[in-house]
Image (cartoon, grey):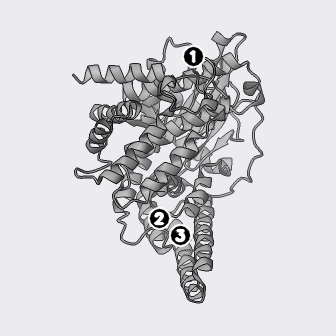
Amino acid sequence: MSKQSDESSPLPARKPGMDRLKTRPFERNLALTKLGFGAGSSIVAHSIRNIFRGEVSRDEANREFYQRQAQVLADELGQLKGSVMKAGQMLSLYGQYFLPPEAVEVLSTLQDDTPAVSWQHVAPVLDRQLGRERLRELDIDEQPIAAASLGQAHRARRKRDGLELVVKIQYPGVADAIDSDIRTLSRLLLMSRLTPKGLDIGPIFAELREMLVQEVDYLAERRFTEDFARRLDGDRRYVVPTVLGEYSGARVLTTTYESGYSPRAAEVSALPQPRRDRLGGAFIELFVREFFDWGLVQTDPHFGNYRVRIGDRADDDRIVLLDFGATRRFERRFVAAYSCIVRGAIEQDHALIERGATEIGLIEAGFPRPAMLAFAQMCETIVEPFTDPAEQRIPKALLTTDGAYRWGDSDLPMRAAQAGAKNALSVHFRVPPREIVFLHRRLAGVFIMLAQLGSQYSPRAAVLDALSRVEVSNR
């Protein structure tokens, strides 16, 4: 969830607020059970109609059916909020490996901002977490500035000194409903017949549960926020909000308000090319440090989690980093194995790619050569911006005269997604480890961010330096 927004950047039109939340397990299960029965009836009717359709019309009808089923699912999850909606968001990430494309497209809409909940339903959380005496020290705007599946954020001001704050409040009952929501949603997914026959979705939902437990842990998010602030202290390219512990708890997180423009704002697009290049470099260099050096990655690339603070000069421009609830730790052995894949893809060394992929668990020993070749080619596509321009692997149209990569003109995410989809259809590929799913979500977000900025920047040196540091540390 984007915790902060800026009055200097116009906010999108607000969706109608929700007067109440379905927080009781019985109430939530009833809503999902009704949805399941509806799905079952739709399946029966769809199957009967398919008997009388030709092959072409049957394929088209199946696509429309998957889209309708997923839309009904997404609409209901959006109303329920909480962990069941967040699980639906995560399914849109995992789903690209096993759900119909039509279903993935619809479920991905759950990533968008959702209707806020009325103040009367979140205010008691503040009372319980902070106490009324502490709350009297603050003026809190009852109209939220952002709302998501697990909670919403409100602007506030500390009365004694006027310090501008943001108070992030978790919806009541969210943490307690996780286990029930996960069980019900897994059954619902099976009833809707959106998953392939024979696929064991148990491990997928076990991972979803673990990640949800982390995302409702505001004490952990506080530690991650403070950790990033410490690590980036002294690097003037970045701003991390300061946590105010006296106004924070297990279900409430209060930080300083940090102003800035949305990366999509016209003011950012109007910056001179060198300044946008510098910002793009800062975005990708941050990711490189997070993964290769720290093994600690904020994996949610939503544009709302970033702001650009424009200074008087290029050196004064800052990237404001918001919301560390989706931060993931990566073990050094995973980082080392993944570095093998990246190094192998850059150098077109298929043996190195295979070694790294095997260590991570993407593939198994004895992988068929044709499938391995397809996988290697996909990896080589993804690392295109990191390659040497002299090798002519980068299309000429995507290079400036001095060898910088034209991110705004690149269709790399689409080409990489197409290659990944072909591999996902192979019987030799499995649903990848969650580390890969969330790492690639952030990596794709970096690519999209640089494209939005229209940056002309070569990340090759930063990536090669990081790979060298990993290799030295593993000797």
Residue at which label 3 appears: 32
Residue at which label 2 appears: 185
Q: Nearer the viewer, residue 197 or 251?
A: 197
Residue at which label 1 appears: 237
Q: Quadrant of residue 7?
A: top right
Q: Amino acid at mark 3?
A: Leu
Earlier along the polypeptide chain: callout 1 or callout 2? 2
Badge nearest the viewer, 3 or 1 = 1
Q: Amino acid at mark 2?
A: Leu
Instruction: Give yes or no for contact between labels 3 and 2 (Cβ–Cβ under 8 Å).
Output: yes
Q: Residue at x 56, y 21 (%)?
A: 281
Q: Quadrant of residue 142?
A: top right
Mark 3 and mark 1: Cα distance apart in space? 46 Å
Q: Amino acid at mark 1?
A: Arg
The residue carrying pointer 2 sits among few (fewer than 14), some (14 to 19) or many (20 or more) residues within 10 Å by Cα, namely many
* Percent position of residue 461, x then y: 46, 19
Mark 1 and mark 2: Cα distance apart in space? 42 Å
Q: Nearer the viewer, residue 202 or 253?
A: 202
Q: Residue at x 54, y 84 (%)?
A: 47
Q: Which disc, if any, is residue 14? A: none
